[in-house]
Amino acid sequence: MKRASTSAQTSSKTAGSMNGGLARIAARCTSRAPRGWCVSRRQTVMMSAANAPDSDSKKGPGSVGALKVVQTLERTVERVGSKQFSLSFATRPAKKQRVVILGTGWGAARLAKELDMGSYDLTVVSPRNHMVFTPLLASTTVGTLDFRSVAVSIRSLQPALGLEPNHFYTAKAKAVDPEAQTVTCISDEGSEFEVQYDKLAIATGAQGSTFNIPGVDEYALPLRDVADASAIKDKLIKNIAKSQIPGTQEAERRRLLNFVIVGGGPTGVEFAGELSNLVKEDLARAVPQVSCSVRITLIEARDILGSFNPDLRLYASRILSKSGVEIVKAQVKEVKETSVVLSDGSEIEHGLLVWSTGVGPTPFITSLPFGKSQDGRLAVDEFQRVEDMEGNAVENVYSLGDCACNTLNPLPTTAQVAEQQGKWLSKHINDQCQPQEDEPEPFKYTHLGQMSAMTTGSAVTDLGGGSGTPQLSFSGFLSWLSWRAVYLTKLGSFQNKLYVLLNWSTSQMMGRDLSRW
Ligand SMILES: Cc1cc2nc3c(=O)[nH]c(=O)nc-3n(C[C@H](O)[C@H](O)[C@H](O)COP(=O)(O)OP(=O)(O)OC[C@H]3O[C@@H](n4cnc5c(N)ncnc54)[C@H](O)[C@@H]3O)c2cc1C
C-alpha cells in the first residue's frame, strides 16, 4: 500500500541519519506498527533539524544540538523498551495529521466531539449537518416534539469545525481509495471533490431492510431521520384532513385512517404508542369523529420487543392492545398502494404505512474495497480497523456503528454501541499522539440495558443481559419517567435539552403541534 510505503520511506530516511541504535529500534518498531504513535509537530521539526545535510559539517553547535536531540530520542525509545509502538508520520511533514470522519450519526458525532483538536485537523463529510437523536424521533412524527429538538448540530458538538483548516462538508462519500488515502465525495448539487486523510473513520450507518419484499420502496415510509419523520407527519395530517372532506366515501375515509406499522422492535412500538397517544389525547378532543374511526395495526412476524425479557414483552402487548393498537402476528408478502398482503393471503388496507424492520448495509458500504461480514457490514478487528479482502487490518482506516461488524464479536446495531465505539475511538486516536507505555486496549462494549416507551405513562426498562449490570427489569410509570430522564440527560446539547423540556410541557398542557405547511 502506498500509505504504508510513504510511512516507511519517511521513517527509513529519518532512521538513516540517526545513530545505529536508534535506527535499529525505529526500524523494528515501524515494521511492527500495530498502531500509530504520531510525532508531535515539535518532535518532527527537531528531527528534520537533526536530518539537515549541513547541520554536521557547517554548524558546529548545530551538530552538537542535533546529536543531543538524537540521544534524547534514543533514551525515550529505550525507556519505552520492549513495548510495541510505531512512529507514524503525517503525510504533510510538520503539520498535524488529518482525521476525516464520514457521517454525523451517533458514532461519528461522539468521535468528532472528543477528538483532540490540538493534535489533529478534522474534516467531517455528511449529507446531514446534525446528529439525529433517534430514540426521540418517533415523538416528532405526531408533534409531541419539534424536529429541531432531536437534531443536534455537529458544529455545536465540535465548535472547532468552523475554523480553518477544519471543515464540515455537506456531501456524501462516494468512494474510498486506501492506496491514495483519499475519499471521493459528491455534494447535493452533484459536484465531486476529493478529501485526503491520514486517518479515516467510516461511520455512515445503515439503511432500513426491505428483504426484497415487492412494493416496500414505493408505498411504505421509513423512519430513520428527520426528513422521514417529517414525511410521516405530513401524510398523517393530510389523511386526517382528507377524511373530513365532504363527499369522501365511507370506505375511503376508513382506509385513510388505517395506520399500519410493520416491525415490532422498539421503533415500531414507540411509533404505535405515539400514534395512540395522539388519537386518545388530541384527536379525541379536537376531532372526535375522526378519532373513533382511526385504526392502528402493528404487524410483527414474531413477538414484539423480541430483545426484551418475556414479562416486559407481555406487558408491552397488553398496554398497546388496551390503547387500541391491534397487534397482528404475521409476515408481509407484498405491499400494494393501498394495502399490505400477508403470507396467509389476507390483506390489510392502509392509508399510512411505516416500515421498521431492521437494517442492512448501504450501497456505499457495499461498494467499498474492504472485507465484509456475512450481513454485508464492514469487517473490523477489535481496534475498529477495517479489514482488507484477505482479512488483514488496514492501518488508519476505522469503522464504527451500524456499518461495522467485528465478526468474532458481533454487536447489535444500536446507538449505544455506536456511541461507545465513537468514544473509544476518539481516545484511541488521541492516545496515538502521546508516548504510550502500555499496550492499547481493544474496544469493549458495556451493555447498559434497553428501554422502550409505549403510551404516556408506560414504558419498559430491561437492564438484564449486560456485563456489570444487575438483572433488573421494570415497567409502568416509573419506567416511563426513567425513559424520559435518561434520554433528556443523554441529549447532546443544552439547547436540545431545553427544547425537549419545553415541547414535553407544551404538548402536555396545550396539545400536540399538528400544523402542516
Ligand atoms: C427511530 C429510531 C429509534 C431508535 N432508537 C434507539 C434507541 O432507543 N436506543 C438505541 O440504542 N438505538 C436506537 N436506534 C438505533 C440507532 O439510532 C442506530 O443504531 C445508530 O443511529 C447508529 O449510529 P451510526 O453512527 O452507526 O449511524 P447513524 O446514526 O445512522 O448515522 C449515519 C450518518 O452517516 C451519514 N451518511 C450516510 N451515508 C453517508 C455517506 N455516503 N457519506 C457520508 N455520510 C453518510 C448520515 O447522514 C448520518 O449522519 C434507533 C433508530 C431509529 C431509526
Image (cartoon, rainbow, N blue to C red):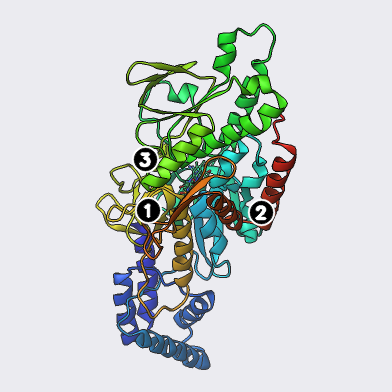
Horizontal and vertical percent position of residue 52: 47, 80
Q: Residue at x 46, y 17 (%)?
A: 339
Q: Secondary structure at mark 1?
A: loop
Gap in Å between the C-alphas at discs 2 and 1? 43 Å
Side of 387 where 516 appears, left or right = right
Query: Between tags 3 and 2, which lies in front?
Result: 2
Say the numbered circle drawn on residue 145.
Answer: none
Say the numbered circle drawn on residue 179.
Answer: 1
Q: Which residue is mark 2?
A: 497
Specify the quadrant of the image occupied by residue 421: bottom left
Amino acid identity at mark 3: Thr
Viewer can see residue 161: no
Q: Residue at x 45, y 45 (%)?
A: 205
Q: Quadrant of the N terminus?
A: bottom left
For disc 3, the neighbor class at 10 Å (few under 14, some 14 to 19, many from 20) is: some
Amino acid identity at mark 1: Glu
| Picture layout, residue 65 above or below residue 130 | below
Along the polypeptide, which appears first: circle 2 or circle 1?
1
Horizontal and vertical percent position of residue 210: 40, 30
Along the polypeptide, which appears first: circle 3 or circle 2?
3
Q: Residue at x 49, y 22 (%)?
A: 219
| Picture layout, residue 101 above or below residue 454 | below
| Picture layout, residue 63 above or below residue 295 | below
Is label 2 in contact with label 1 (beta carbons under 8 Å)? no
Horizontal and vertical percent position of residue 45: 52, 77
Gap in Å between the C-alphas at discs 3 and 2? 36 Å
Between residues 40 and 48, which one lies in front from this camera angle?
40
Horizontal and vertical percent position of residue 393: 31, 58
Viewer can see residue 79: yes
For disc 2, the neighbor class at 10 Å (few under 14, some 14 to 19, many from 20) is: some
